[in-house]
Image (spheres, grey):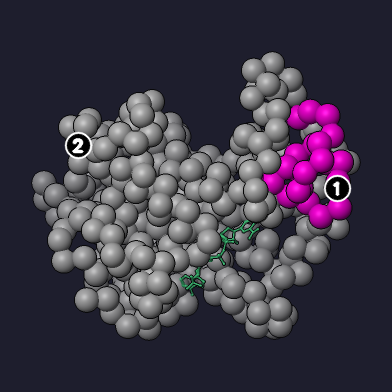
Amino acid sequence: MVQPANKPNICSNEEQLCPRQCQSEGERVCSALSRRGALTFGAALLAASPSLAANDVGVSPPCVFVAGATGRTGQEVVSEALRLGFQVKAGVRSAEKARRAGLLDDPAVDVCVLDLMEASVGDIIPLLEGAQAVICAAGFTPTYLSGVDADLSHQIDNVGTLKLLSAAEASLTVERFILISSLLTNSPGSASYKLLNSLGNVLDEKHVAEVAVERSPLKSVILRPGIFAAKKQGDVMTFGADTFRAGESDIRPGPPVRCVSPFMASENSSICAVTRAQIARLSLDAVSLPVASSLLLEVVARPDAKEILKRKAF
Ligand SMILES: NC(=O)c1ccc[n+]([C@@H]2O[C@H](COP(=O)([O-])OP(=O)(O)OC[C@H]3O[C@@H](n4cnc5c(N)ncnc54)[C@H](OP(=O)(O)O)[C@@H]3O)[C@@H](O)[C@H]2O)c1
């Protein structure tokens, strides 16, 4: 049974969807798969047909915990994860919202009630049990009341995310933390930064979480998209940290394009925003991306992305 939203506790699915198989309690690598197995699964899956089921490659599918699973991005992450053959633990703050999103009907999804404002690190650890990766798609929902938004943003995008990270570090199975953050978190000064950050200081709060994730002993991938576009505007291009600062010195991967830009005033910008579906797919690719310790990617799109990448023209 799903617990009431204000009581983070066990997850809903009575079958052990993401079983934890330990050699011994003291062992850190403690999952349905060996560490290597879990992290190569995604790569194998991507190289093969996207619809390839886990059983076809003879290993248990890895399990991802998605925080903010009833959000617009979170729902995309869950459905793409299922399509790719992952097992999913869906972290939701409202069981009722999870029911409306159809998450309770899906036998491949274990719904875990988690309010990042209410839960302690100790509450969160058992929810992550069996997951090899945590994808954080949670973020505060703006009220447009500045004091309220500043508090919510601090509690969720900063403190709540840090609690999730600490729980992931303490869990026996989680190997990797993937954070959906935002462009401009480390670029104070520009007009776009000021405008976006005026919403509850959200960029500053997210930056605190980014720094903690980068310092974590877990492997991590931080994704920085711009303001999500409703429609796909081209294929995804990724760049390193602080490539795009909404300033004159930003690199231009190609000629100006007319599209919805991650930044505010830029009809003739050279980069376009990605959609939530695109960031969802990238967050799942990040589960198996070779990463030494931490990777931060700024994520944009362009209609001619493939051509540019082929020519390496920037
Ligand atoms: N929107 C953009 O254009 C944009 C651009 C760049 C980056 N981002 C970032 O991308 C992420 C996803 O954005 P989105 O647009 O998909 O957001 P969204 O639809 O508002 O989803 C946010 C999710 O966070 C959950 N959440 C809020 N408060 C919570 C709490 N106290 N405990 C646990 N979960 C909580 C929400 O739960 P409920 O479903 O119960 O409301 C929801 O599932 C966010 O971190 C956002 O800051 C967004």
Q: Which residue is mark 1?
A: 266
How crowded pointer 1 is (Cα within 10 Å; few <14, some 14-19, many 20+) is rated as some
Q: Which residue is located at x 87 percent, y 41 percent?
A: 268
Main secondary structure along the magenta-highlighted residues: loop
Q: Does 65 sit left or right of 238 as displayed? A: left
Residue 242: tell me if it is visible: no
The x and y percentages for residue 122 are: 31, 71
Q: Which residue is located at x 81 percent, y 47 percent?
A: 246
Q: Which residue is located at x 71 percent, y 82 percent?
A: 145
The x and y percentages for residue 308 are: 70, 23
| Disc 1 element | loop
| Disc 2 element | helix
Is 23 located above or below residue 7 in the figure?
Answer: above
Q: Nearer the viewer, residue 186 or 88?
A: 88
Q: Quadrant of the C terminus?
A: top right
Q: Which residue is mark 2?
A: 55
Asked if residue 44 is among those painted magenta in the image, a careful observer would answer no
Is 6 located above or below residue 172 in the figure?
Answer: below
Q: Which residue is located at x 86 percent, y 53 percent?
A: 265
Ligand 1: image quarter:
bottom right
Which label number is shown at residue 237? none
Q: Which residues are magenta?
A: 253-274
Q: Nearer the viewer, residue 108 or 196?
A: 108
The x and y percentages for residue 203 are: 68, 61
Q: Residue furthest left?
A: 23
Q: Does 15 sit left or right of 139 as displayed? A: left
